[in-house]
Amino acid sequence: MAQFSVRTGWPDGTVAQEAILAADASAARTEVERRGGHVFEVRRQGIGWKTARQRRGRVRIGDFLVFNQEMIALLKAGLPVVHSFEILLERQESPVLRRVLTDVREKVNAGSSLSDAFAAQGDIFPRLYWTSLKAGEKSGEIEAVLRRYLKYQKTVLGLSRKVISTLVYPAILIFISAILIMILMTFVIPRFSTLYEDFNADLPLLTLIVIRTAGFLRDNVALILVGGTVLVFLLTRWLRSSSGREWGTRFLLKIPLIGGIFLRFAISQFTRSLATLLGGGTPLVPAMENAADAIGNLHVSKRVRNVVPRVREGGELWRALESTDIFTNLTIEMIKVGEMSGALEEMLSSVSDFYDEEIDVRLARVISFVEPAILVGMGGVIVTILLSVYLPIFRIMSQIKG
């Protein structure tokens, strides 16, 4: 599987560019044509071809959120979209975002819609953003759509930061403990080993195991470092591939304790994205496709994308999602009630809000368990090493006294 950048024309007259995972260019073209689009250009993203983000640099999420916040304020004041865009561009301080927005302005001045101009920037901006803009242009409510997207982005960003910050402390504990163990095994234990050889004493089994392990690490440290570096490099390259990413994201869902957190985060991303798009006026099928792309977990994203044809053919959304075996019973029931009552957007928002709160609770519970477990585990390893060092000393002293 490879990633292709496809420039497509749609029956409503819009032109958009999107990234598609496919076996080859022909498969990517077939996928777009199956959805009713006309393909203008297909380009492979890979070796020798840099993405838009790589060519122009990374747009910081903070700068992008500030830009949209200011755009909302200008639109609320009654300024036209193009005029508001010109004002914000002139006072933009980020050089990367300024270059990108300049290209957007040129495309708008050339006759493209604002959403198509953002879509043409490739992977720099989230697909959810320019599809929301497209819906806002059709409904004439760009300000409301931007406000809804901004709220969505702040919520997701805040939740992501909370998850990361919660996991930082356990990661630091593991890192420091690992360094301490390496120092003991490579510097301290060999010195005691020499001391025991001078005494010519019989060593306990635990001491022999630790000394031989330390000797192996010391004698093969260069080989271990090179091998570990190569292994990490190859594993990283594989995890960046399509099959590797899917395996990695599927594996995350199966990890005890934290797998449920990753699953609920993926569900929250999907339901919040779908609610945002539906609230902006996007039809269900394209909204579902874009919401699937907004899911950070590739395995969940592909499972959702696979059931989109069932909804396109007239099937119920809740039945299609139930067939993925991914979504919880609560999610399915809430969506079912939303479809039956005509309040799907509200029910989707309720699901995402509920799981955001549950993620907080589960994170606190995991941390309350993980931190003591790490301390006990690493402390046990260090105590075992120190005990193996002092056992022969205690034995020698007892023999001398005897």
Image: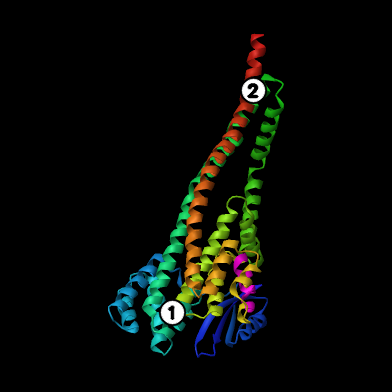
- Which quadrant of the figure has residue 332? bottom right
Q: Which residue is mark 2?
A: 391
Q: Position of residue 380 (x, y in %)?
A: 60, 33
Q: Position of residue 146 (x, y in %)?
A: 39, 75
Question: In this picture, which residue range is highlighted in magenta?
Answer: 299-310
In the rendered view, tell whether residue 134 sits above or below residue 221.
Answer: below
Q: Inspect the magenta stretch and tell me whether residue 230 lies in it.
A: no
Q: Is residue 399 left or right of residue 330?
A: right
Three-letter code, disc 2: Leu
In the rendered view, tell whether residue 318 sits above or below residue 27.
Answer: above
Specify few, some or many for label 2: CA neighbours under 10 Å numbering under 14, 14-19, or 20 or more: some
- Which quadrant of the figure has residue 217? top right
Q: Position of residue 283 (x, y in %)?
A: 52, 81
Q: Secondary structure at mark 1?
A: helix
Residue at image point 68% right, 36% down? 213
Q: Which residue is mark 1?
A: 133
Q: Position of residue 70 (x, y in %)?
A: 32, 72
What numbered label is drawn on residue 21? none
Three-letter code, disc 1: Leu
Outermost residue to the top: 402
Q: Inspect the magenta stretch and tell me whether residue 308 lies in it.
A: yes
Residue at image point 60% right, 64% down? 327
Q: Quadrant of the C terminus?
A: top right
Tag count: 2
